[in-house]
Amino acid sequence: MLDEKRLKEIEKKVPIMKNDREIVKDDKNKDLVKFYIDNALTSLNTARILSEVSAKISLKKNFDFIDDSFETHLWIINSSYYSMFYTSGALLAKIGIKIKSEIVIHKKTFEVLVYYFYLTKRIAKHYLEEFEEAQKESQGLLGAEEPATVMQKKALELVTKYDFEIEKRSTFTYNMGVKAKASKSETSLMRALEFYNECLKIMDKL
């Protein structure tokens, strides 16, 4: 939650990130808006297509390699989150902001978004809290967001933690019922669509 303590931490942290060149503000970064919007829309449409295929037997019959039990709820949740992530990138690019650091980029995107849009009263608090909730759900389902080069260096560590990760993910991925997953994926998709539309409205005013 975005309580006062956390907001003060972000207020101190982002200027440090800027000084360390982890984030850069330059008008040239505005050229990235279309890239982020295109990726956001692709992710959102992917989630919508997966939702349709999961819900309709008639659509499943178009593919001879899947059966009636086929469902993609976990991937709907992930694609919905990535739509929000790319939309956030577009919002930041619109004011010339680009996050240079690839390490924990998802967390930094959230913090920078809070700094430049919530603390300046450009976006409502609940949109950011929903973005962070989607982020946590996606990472919990599909693992860490470290870049491939860092992951290679951590290969040994990951192997030793494999059993722990399997147990952690199974709580949601394997033990949650289909109806519960379907409900959660529907919430994720609607949340992503609302976030996308709201951010487009904000960008139109910038």
Image: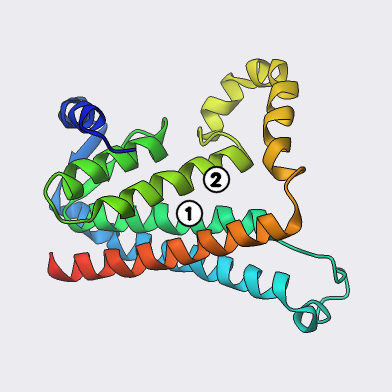
Q: Residue visible at 73% across and 36% down?
A: 170
**Above or below for 197 versus 22:** below
| Nearest to the observer: residue 125 or residue 193 | 125
Dots 1 and 2: beta carbons under 8 Å? Answer: yes
Q: Earlier in the sequence, mark 1 or mark 2?
A: 1
Number of residues whose C-alpha sits closer than 10 Å to that of mark 2, classed few (under 14), some (14–19) or many (20 or more): many
Q: Residue visible at 26% across and 30% down?
A: 6
Quarter of the C terminus within the rendering: bottom left
Task: Place residue 84 in its image quadrant.
Answer: bottom left
Q: Nearer the viewer, mark 1 or mark 2?
A: 2
Q: Residue visible at 26% across and 46% down?
A: 113
Task: Place residue 53 in its image quadrant.
Answer: bottom right
57 horizontally vs 168: left or right: right
Residue most extreme to the bottom: 58
| Nearest to the observer: residue 84 or residue 148 | 84
Image coordinates of residue 187 in percent, x first then y, are 52, 61
**Above or below for 121 versus 31:** above
Image coordinates of residue 93 in percent, x first then y, are 24, 54
135 horizontally vs 51: left or right: left
Q: Residue visible at 53% across and 29% down?
A: 149
Quarter of the N terminus within the rendering: top left
- Classify mark 1: helix, strand or loop: helix
Image coordinates of residue 31 in percent, x first then y, are 24, 60
Return the residue at label 1. Answer: 82
- Classify mark 2: helix, strand or loop: helix
Return the residue at label 2. Answer: 138
